Image (spheres, helix red, strand yellow):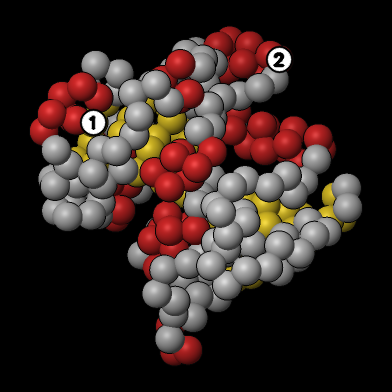
Amino acid sequence: MGRPFIFINSAMSADGKISTKQRKQVRISGKEDFDRMDALRASSDAIMVGIGTLLADNPGLTVKSPERRIERKEAGLEENPARIVVDSKARIPLDSDIFIKGEGKRIIVVSSSAPADRMERLREKATIVSAGDSEVDLAAAVEILHEMGINRLMVEGGATLNWGLLSGGLVDEIYTFVGNLIIGGKTAPTFADGNGFLEKDILKLELIDAARMEEGVLLRWKVLSGK
């Protein structure tokens, strides 16, 4: 059994926040970083978010560049990567933008505790993957996704999903754009929330690249302790 190459892409404030305490998306970077993110999307087999991010921001997760969409189709691919939502209880609204915007496969990853009636309605719009009992078992889920042909998986958060993947040793690389603003707030989501590591288990990274971009800095990391 294998898993995809998994990388997280995220923008954060200088104090490590990815949204406000109301969990509303804040514009941290600009056009140059958005184009970089779009190129990463176009290079991926799938894009994954957690249900919290979807409910807060309702992202479409499409490739925005017409040229990149054309390049994907010329390569025999759908113009958008598969869009994946990790949603243990199948809470995703049926009118979410990922069901409306752009062509491509939609995949909802649920646990066995998801209500049967919700799953039945979702099957009309998406492929359902079940992994785990009360919560999604991410390690099992990414193995199933790999069997489905997903070899390069881009993760766009948020904090709970990032933590689940990182703490499970399932991440290979991380891109972080650090912007020139302070958000603050003890309840505002950070890049990775969850329970946090004990000192002996802290995840180590290796810096691959650092570059000034717009009014911030783009960092690319290799995760040293991934499984």
State the image quarter where residue 66 is shown: top right
Q: Amino acid at mark 2?
A: Glu
Lateral position of residue 197 relative to residue 130, left or right: right
Lateral position of residue 55 relative to residue 156, left or right: left
Q: Residue at x 74, y 49 (%)?
A: 28
In x, y percent, where is residue 109? 28, 40
Above or below 32: residue 175: below
Work out whether mark 1 precedes mark 2 in sequence or the reverse, and give the earlier one: 2
1 vs 2, front mark: 1
In x, y percent, where is residue 181? 80, 60
Q: Residue at x 59, y 47 (%)?
A: 24
Q: Residue at x 53, y 32 (%)?
A: 59
User: Which residue in the structure is indicated by mark 2?
Assistant: 67
Q: Are marks 1 and 2 in contact (CB under 8 Å)?
A: no
- Quarter of the C terminus within the rendering: bottom left
Seen as rendered, the residue at the extreme bottom is 200
State the image quarter where residue 126 is shown: top left
In x, y percent, where is residue 33? 76, 41
Q: CA distance from mark 1 to mark 2?
A: 31 Å
The secondary structure type at the circle numbered 1 is: strand
Q: Nearer the viewer, residue 178 or 92?
A: 92
Lateral position of residue 34 relative to residue 63, left or right: right
Q: Which labelled disc corresponds to residue 128?
A: 1
In x, y percent, where is residue 117? 13, 29
Lateral position of residue 131 relative to residue 58, left or right: left
